[in-house]
Amino acid sequence: MKLTIFAGTPGAGKTAVLLHMLKTLIRQGVRPSIVKIDCLYTDDHERFSQCNIPVLLGLSKDMCPDHFSIYNTDEMIRFAEKNNSDYLIVETAGLCHRCAPYTENCIGVCVTDATSGPNNPMKTGPFLSCADIVVVTKGDMISQAEREIFRERVLECNPQCKIVDANGLSGQGCAELAQLIGDNKKEVTRHEQLRHNAPFSVCTLCAGEKRVNRNFHRGLLRNMNGFQEYVGE
């Protein structure tokens, strides 16, 4: 079974691109299962259900959505196996620009918005630099010169990636994306590991501390000058 993880910034068009791509895969006889990860609320899982695709919804609530997704990976794989699926496709919440949700044997897809500015690829961290495929959306809303600059910035951050220009409204480019995913030979295993370490989440704020004075904070902390230290037992 193949595991594909869709990551990207909010509003980049992950769900729209994914829906078009799924229709292409289904026409090719592929049996997919979908897992939708979000924080507080989403109705995207209903859109997947309308396509008669098995879908599992996970809401991370107070937990980091990527930590939530990583922690529940085994359950997601069991869900897809129960459905006898060829593909398990996970769409992440897409919040933290430091996210690193990809496993070694998944097909990592980063969806990014071309209108977000030419420097955006350098701000997005491992979920772009570690991706196998980078999908650039909303390219029709900027000039050709801006598209070329954005493309070069993506390649500066991830020289090995395949770039697909896609339109979430018309579905343009989604068949190419489906082909790239279909050509990939990686198979998910029971012993998956992350390609890149996830953001650290060891501090008193994560445990519910509300006081802002640094005297009340413990854990892995970083100062404005970049100095990182661990305070506590």
Image: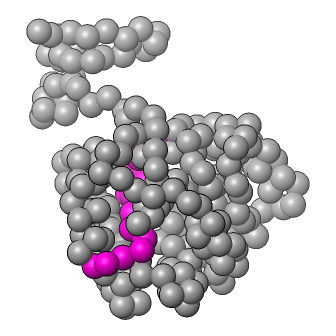
Q: Quadrant of the N terminus?
A: bottom left
**Residue 84 magenta-drawn?**
yes
Say which residue appears at 63% left-offset and 44% top-offset.
120
Query: Residue 125: which quarter of the image?
Result: top right
Say which residue appears at 21% left-offset and 9% top-offset.
231
Q: Nearer the viewer, residue 80 or 200?
A: 80
Q: Is residue 110 left or right of residue 91?
A: right
Q: Nearer the viewer, residue 163 or 228?
A: 163
Query: Residue 12: which quarter of the image?
Result: bottom right
Q: Position of residue 52 (x, y in %)?
A: 36, 90
Query: Residue 140: which quarter of the image?
Result: bottom right
Q: Position of residue 58 (x, y in %)?
A: 24, 63
Q: Quadrant of the C terminus?
A: top left
Boundaries of the magenta span: 83-101
Say which residue appears at 62% left-offset and 55% top-offset.
133
In the picture shown, does residue 211 fall above or below 54? above
Magenta part, dominant SS: loop
Q: Position of residue 82 (x, y in %)?
A: 23, 75
